[in-house]
Amino acid sequence: MRSKLPFYLKRFGVAQGLRLYFLLKSKRKGLVRIRIPQARHPIYLRLGTSDRNVFNNIFVQGEYDAVELGNHPQTFLDGGGNIGLAAVYFANRYPAMQIVSVEPESENFKMLQLNCQSYETIRAVQAGLWSRSTHLDIRDAGGGAWGFQVEETDRPTPASVRAESIEALIRANGGKPFEVVKLDIEGSEAEVFRTCTEPWLPFVRALIVELHEWMIPGSSASFVAATAPYNYRKTVSGEYEVYERQDLTV
């Protein structure tokens, strides 16, 4: 596997790049606090977990760098917030944008709160994204802390998490539609786009999505059917497909 050290050196400089590279590559366990030029506030990571992979994707390899959100977007939904690093990235890049970051899994959500606590523009919500309000069970799909999946349950337990629709999150956000929606929700996009998209999708200027057809067959079909009425320009940024509305003028 190709070493990521050159990326660290390019992003953070020689001294800091070397220090961060060997710190995050070590076999140590525990919580670390790091500072990087790309973030106004410290970033917290759990050593020995997939947190390093998330950090590498976003801040080292720049998987969102090609995403251009024109017209100064004011509202952003971060679906599948994980430990909050996507929210932190966009909060630093677009300081005036109000971000709602949604993550269902409890330990990840604690990290999300920790990473986002110093940003007044980020609001953290513990929930799973779904097409309606219900309850979800969380299961590990084998991807570690960045690969949890959810499934609807008729019998909620203390371990279940609430599910929220994007429409409900808009109501909780003072009725302000989300201009940008980022979704990395491990196959739940099949349900999110399957139905009840009319209250929110027409107002979205940009979609940043990772479809998980290999996890949940039908994810791509739901997405294609829901977005078919609108005119998008598609680009790719890292593992994400970016869809920018070309027919939205208001």
Image: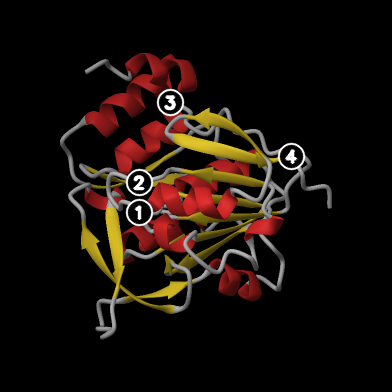
The three-letter code of the residue at mark 3 reads: Gln
The part of the image, by quadrant, that contains residue 43 is top left
Report if the CB atoms under discs 2 and 1 are less than 8 Å apart: yes
Q: Residues within 10 Å of mark 1 (few under 14, many from 20)?
A: many
Q: Earlier in the sequence, mark 2 or mark 1?
A: 1
What separation in Å lies between label 2 and label 3 (alpha carbons)? 21 Å
What separation in Å lies between label 4 and label 2 (alpha carbons)? 25 Å
Residue drawn at (39%, 51%), measured in percent from left and top? Answer: 219
Q: Is residue 214 shown above or below 105?
A: above
Residue under label 1: 187
Residue 1, numbered label: none
Residue under label 3: 61
The three-letter code of the residue at mark 1 reads: Gly
Residue under label 4: 246
Which one is closest to the eye, mark 2 or mark 3? 2
Q: Earlier in the sequence, mark 4 or mark 1?
A: 1
Residue 160 location in percent, x, y?
Answer: 29, 77
Query: Total of numbered circles in the picture?
Result: 4
Q: Secondary structure at mark 1?
A: loop
Q: Secondary structure at mark 4?
A: loop
Q: Is residue 106 shown above or below 180?
A: below
Residue under label 2: 212
Residue 189 location in percent, x, y?
Answer: 43, 56
Residue drawn at (77%, 48%), measured in percent from left and top? Answer: 248
Q: Earlier in the sequence, mark 4 or mark 2?
A: 2
The three-letter code of the residue at mark 2 reads: His
What separation in Å lies between label 1 and label 3 (alpha carbons)? 24 Å
